[in-house]
Amino acid sequence: MNEGIRLNRYLAMCGLGARRKVEEIIASGRVKVDGKVVLMPAYRVSEENTVSVDGSLVQPESKVYVVMNKPAGWVCSVSDPFDPVIADLLPEKYRSFRLFPVGRLDRETEGLLILTNDGAFAQEVLHPSRNILREYHALLDREINGKAVKKWLSGIELDGRLLKPSSVRILDREPAGRWVSVVLAEGVKREVRRMAQSLGFEVEVLVRKRIGKMELKELPAGKFVEMSRGELWNAIRSRGSV
């Protein structure tokens, strides 16, 4: 069979797990195509085939794309024993889609967050070759001057790597001299907070305001909008806003 897609990819699209997990399922003889056990991950299937796992029919999940204004105090996780998770901010109908965040925000960071069950889309957005910049607005615990901004721009070493923001500028908003815009090309855990700390500042409020060219403007904290894949890519690439 030359047409169609590989069985391991098909099962992953059905929400049965990542490649390694679905290949284990295939190897264990639990998968049938048109009633016959198939043990080859590369076996090709199409929409004309009937695929079952453990006797139950499986079909690819619908892809869902959600853009949320994450509030502070919520964890970017499917479940957490101690803190409320962002999945709880979504209506019940979204639970079955197993949405996950595309690039995490830490517990106290607010702002733009994409949730989806489309792994390929997530990888595209996060891959450095796409050069999708992210802009954060940070409220510092005290005023910052041009000298400190220049030092920030020159790069700061974190985890043995020299990380250089694409842009750092002081914003014209109150309290004066304490709000900065930081634009990043890559994501490292708590990057903005740790950069600020290395310069002697603490971040009191941190908001992700932009992903690519998609800006956070009117969407209230804790609210979300659902988009199609095309609409979301268009917003990211062509100066959309939520």
Image (cartoon, rainbow, N blue to C red):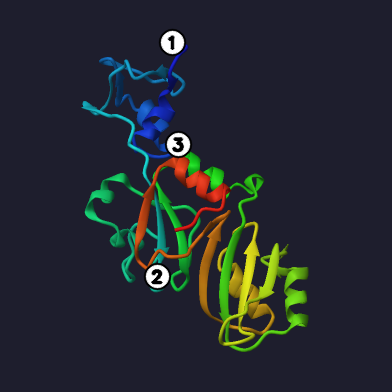
Q: Please tell me whether mark 2 sits on a helix, a strand or a loop.
A: loop
Asked whether, in this view, residue 59 is left or right of residue 137, the answer is left
Q: Which residue is pictured at 40% across the width and 64% down the height? A: 219
Name the residue carrying label 2: 71
Amino acid bearing label 2: Pro
Q: Which residue is pictured at 33% across the width and 47% down the height? A: 98
How far is disc 1 from disc 3 in space, using C-alphas? Answer: 23 Å
> Which quarter shows the C terminus?
bottom left
Name the residue carrying label 3: 20
Amino acid bearing label 3: Arg
Q: In terms of sequence position, does the residue under pointer 2 or pointer 3 come before the other?
A: 3
Q: Nearer the viewer, residue 118 or 197?
A: 118
Q: Which residue is pictured at 64% across the width and 77% down the height? A: 196
Q: Please tell me whether mark 3 sits on a helix, a strand or a loop.
A: helix
Q: Residues within 10 Å of mark 2 (few under 14, many from 20)?
A: many
Asked whether, in this view, residue 58 is left or right of residue 40, the answer is left
Amino acid bearing label 1: Met
Q: Residues within 10 Å of mark 1 (few under 14, many from 20)?
A: few
Up-down relation of residue 34 to residue 218 (above or below): above
Q: Residues within 10 Å of mark 3 (few under 14, many from 20)?
A: few
Q: Nearer the viewer, residue 28 or 234?
A: 234
Contact flag, marks 1 and 2 (Cβ < 8 Å): no
Asked whether, in this view, residue 121 is left or right of residue 168, the answer is left
How far is disc 2 from disc 3 in space, using C-alphas? Answer: 34 Å
Q: In terms of sequence position, does the residue under pointer 1 or pointer 2 come before the other?
A: 1
Q: In terms of sequence position, does the residue under pointer 1 or pointer 3 come before the other?
A: 1
Name the residue carrying label 1: 1
Q: Which residue is pictured at 63% across the width and 45% down the height? A: 130
